[in-house]
Amino acid sequence: MQSLSSSSIDGTLLTLSSVGILLAAFACLGSKLFNRYVAYYGFQSVLLSFAAAVVAYHYDSAELWALAVITLALKGIAIPVATQRLLLHRLDLKRDVALSTGLSTSLIVGALLTAFAYLVIEPADLPHGVVAASVVPLSTAVVLLGGLAMVVRRHTVAQLIGWLITENGVFLGAITLVATFPFIVEAGIFLDLVAATLIMVVFVSGITRRLAEATSSELRGLQG
């Protein structure tokens, strides 16, 4: 199977979409508004589905086409919409003030992590000119930024989105490096992650609703 060249149109589109995915991760890291936070994640997932479609077109893979469609439907549309309606609107979540560091500090650390990814991640086994040589550091940077978002954000919903951003980075690297994975393996890993995400959303929603409905006397009863 011919490698995806960085000088080809497909390689250029994949690189540009990867850069967009990284910028969306930075946008999430620098936003305090929950609705924008979720919207940036949805935009990132749409770009991820586009990247998967580019790889599917290049290798003429029906399995990757199906994976791109699933990514768009679930990660790009279903999860952001469900998060908006089930968590943000019902619980009236607007602005995230539970930050362990300032936004400017978070962005600086994110830039340093991105530089670290480019300095350390060198796919030496790949021939020169292969698009994966530039996309793999980008996907690694997205993983690191998602992990950073989980660390600096203290609200559970914000940490959940950070975890999903990390998963997007892993998925981007996977479709770039291992385009020949059997479809059942790719779909199984992907659906397991989606199922875990939905379980986390339901768990967070239930716990938050219970706390919101609890009376002050019930909360005082929880003290030791």
Image (cartoon, rainbow, N blue to C red):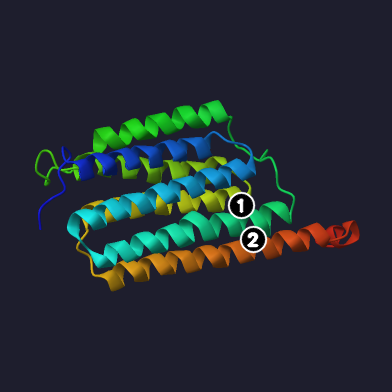
**Circle number at residue 157:** 1
Q: Amino acid at mark 1?
A: Val
Distance between mark 1 and mark 2 Cα atoms: 7 Å
Disc nearer the start of the sequence (1/2): 1
Q: Name the foreground residue: 210 vs 66.
A: 66
Which residue position is annotated with label 2?
Answer: 204
Give the residue drawn at x 63%, y 53%: 84
| Quarter occupied by residue 61 | bottom left
Q: Is residue 133 left or right of residue 27?
A: left
Which quadrant would residue 128 be assigned to in this image? top left
Q: Where does the N terminus fall, quadrant-wise?
A: bottom left
Along the viewing direction, whichever of 222 and 82 lies nearer the viewer = 82
The 10 Å Cα crowd at callout 2, few under 14, some 14 to 19, many 20 or more, is some
Name the side, left or right, on which 174 lies relative to 168.
Answer: left
- Please state the horizontal and vertical placement of residue 173, each as a whole percent of the image: 29, 51
Seen at 14% across and 43% down, the residue is 5
Q: How many marks?
A: 2
